[in-house]
Amino acid sequence: MQLSSIHCRTQETVQRDRAESAQLDNVRIVAERAATAWGLEAIAAEKREARHLRVLAIAELAAAHARESRGDEDPSFSENPDRGLA
């Protein structure tokens, strides 16, 4: 399961707050380490999400180019009513 960057940043904040309010050193240390780990995972998630958006944009450009090269004016209009259902 891939975590979203929003979830990771939220967990990072929770752990940083826990570290700030902890009275015991061991609790503070563990919370700080957890916050750092969540921050690293958030960076990885942000990279994954950005890559996904780039792939979608490239696919859309390729589809637009293919439609243009076939001469399709409006891809939503077709004389065949079943065209988009296959």
Image (tube, rainbow, N blue to C red):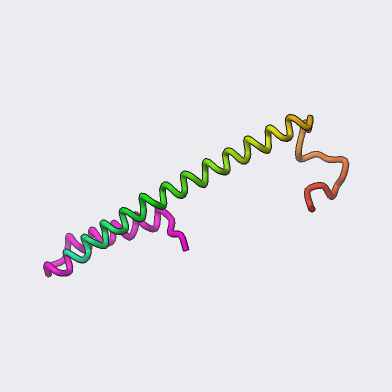
Report the residue that reaches farthest toward the right.
79
Where's residue 24, x and y in %? 12, 69
Question: Which quadrant of the view contains residue 15?
Answer: bottom left
Residue 70 is a magenta residue: no
**Residue shown at 34%/57% (left/top)?**
10
Q: Say which quarter of the image contains residue 73.
A: top right
Residue drawn at x 42%, y 47% is: 47
Residue 85: horizontal and vertical position, in percent? 79, 52
Horizontally, residue 39 falls left or right of residue 85, namely left
Residue at 80%, 39% (x, y): give it. 77
Q: Residue at x 28, y 61 (%)?
A: 14
Q: Which residues are magenta?
A: 1-28
Q: Main secondary structure of the magenta part?
A: helix
Q: Where residue 53 sits in the image (x, y, percent)? A: 52, 43
In this rendering, is residue 52 above or below 10?
above
Given residues 67 and 5, the one toward you in this image is: 67
* Residue 12 within the segment the image draws in magenta: yes
Q: In the figure, residue 9 lies in which quadrant?
A: bottom left
